[in-house]
Amino acid sequence: MKVELRNLTKVFPSRDKKSGKDVTAVNNFTFEIPDGKLVGLLGPSGCGKSTTLYMISGLQQPTSGKIFFGEEDVTELAPENRGIGLVFQNYALYPHMTVQQNILFPLQNLRGKDKMTKEAMLERAYEAAKLVQIDELMDRKPSELSGGQQQRVAIARALVKMPRVLLLDEPLSNLDARLRLQTREEIRRIQKETGITTVFVTHDQEEAMSISDVIVVMKLGVVQQTGKPQEIYDNPTNLFVAKFLGTPPINVFKGRVENERLYIGENAVLDVKGVKDGNVTAAIRPEGFVLDENGPLVCELSNVEIMGRDVSIVSRHSESLNPTIRSIIDADNRIDATAEGVRFTLKPHKVFLFDAESEERLYFEV
């Protein structure tokens, strides 16, 4: 099911009676979610991603704009009539019910032509439980399950109605790191097997990049960039997007361009053909550094961290806007951890320039 958002806006009345200033949670959001794809809504807390999800679900009404499921305008349609499955951050399971009863609950509330026989409901419930691999836990109560198992019950309960659209609101936030990794892989597997159009809300860029077909990066209710995860990582449209994606985070420097050359401090570190003279912000991905004893970028060495296949060089520079610079190099490289300084050349396609004021991208020939 294709989902289309047209000029979607949500404004909440101000809680401060003195200022009286309304809060725009989502501002003129236009986007098409392709049929059968998993789309990640990504951004920091307060960026409007959950509000967008709740407008798609019908739990919140947009101030303006339209929502279409396929060709059907569902903007005014009640949540129960939209054909959505919704999974909350806190699972929202009924503690007094067994796993089976929790999964059956949405089917037991069907009325009219949609009403099912008891046998058909049980068959559907076991199909959903088997899909999320909890079919052997049907007689347990939520309190007897791990966090990951509870999350699977919540997903099975959302899937049992065979929804047109599956909506997941930060479903992994309450899980430990290992379980988050395992569960996100399961969500991706389930989504691919069912082919259900899915919207996944998260503030974790690694989560979004690892399982999404398309990600939407948001800031203060405004869409900053949309696209395939790797495309956005490789080609951020502004400094916010560049800083938000990537682990370790991108390294940011104060710089300037003179005669189409990028200077960081006193050193010309890269040719940037096509960029006008002036102050810029330079951002370099951790993997964009090449260890070079004659390299033009000179940093003060702080530490060397051996990470198996990679080495993380931690250094400092007077023009760095990060407390420390992290450079990821191949473990085959040998570096003297007792040295005072370290020198690098830069990979041009891993260096991004931004206007120092607007923070918009400045493009140069690579």
Image: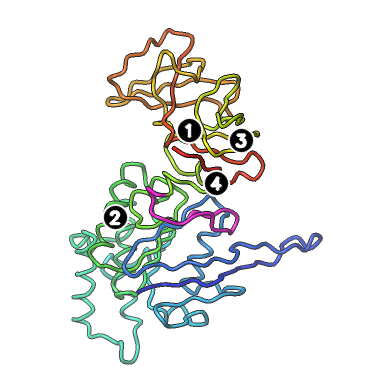
State how far apart marks 3 and 2 are (Cα): 49 Å
Circle on res. 69: none
The amino acid type of the residue labelled 4 equals Asn
Q: Determine if residue 281 is in view.
A: yes
Q: Residue at label 4?
A: 238
Instruction: Tell me the crowding category of disc 2: few under 14, some 14 to 19, or many 20 or more residues within 10 angstroms, Cα based.
Output: some
268 with respect to 345 (left or right): right
Q: Which mark is residue 280?
A: 3
Q: What residue lies at 39% left-to-right and 31% top-to-bottom?
A: 287
Residue type marked 1: Ile
Select label 1 or label 2 by which is in front. Answer: 1
State the CA–CA distance, disc 3 to disc 4: 12 Å
Percent x, y of residue 57? 46, 72
Q: Amino acid at mark 2?
A: Gln
Number of numbered discs visible in the structure rendering: 4
Q: Which residue has dot 1 on it?
A: 284
Label 2 belongs to which residue?
149
Of pointers 1 and 4, the one earlier in the residue sequence? 4
Q: Which residues are magenta?
A: 217-231
Which amino acid type is shown beneath numbered disc 3?
A: Val
Tell me the mark number nearer the camera, choosing from 1 and 3. 3
**Few, some or many C-alpha atoms within 10 Å of disc 4 (few <14, some 14-19, many ≥20)?**
some
Residue visible at 35% across and 23% down in the picture: 311
Would you say residue 227 sits in the magenta stretch? yes
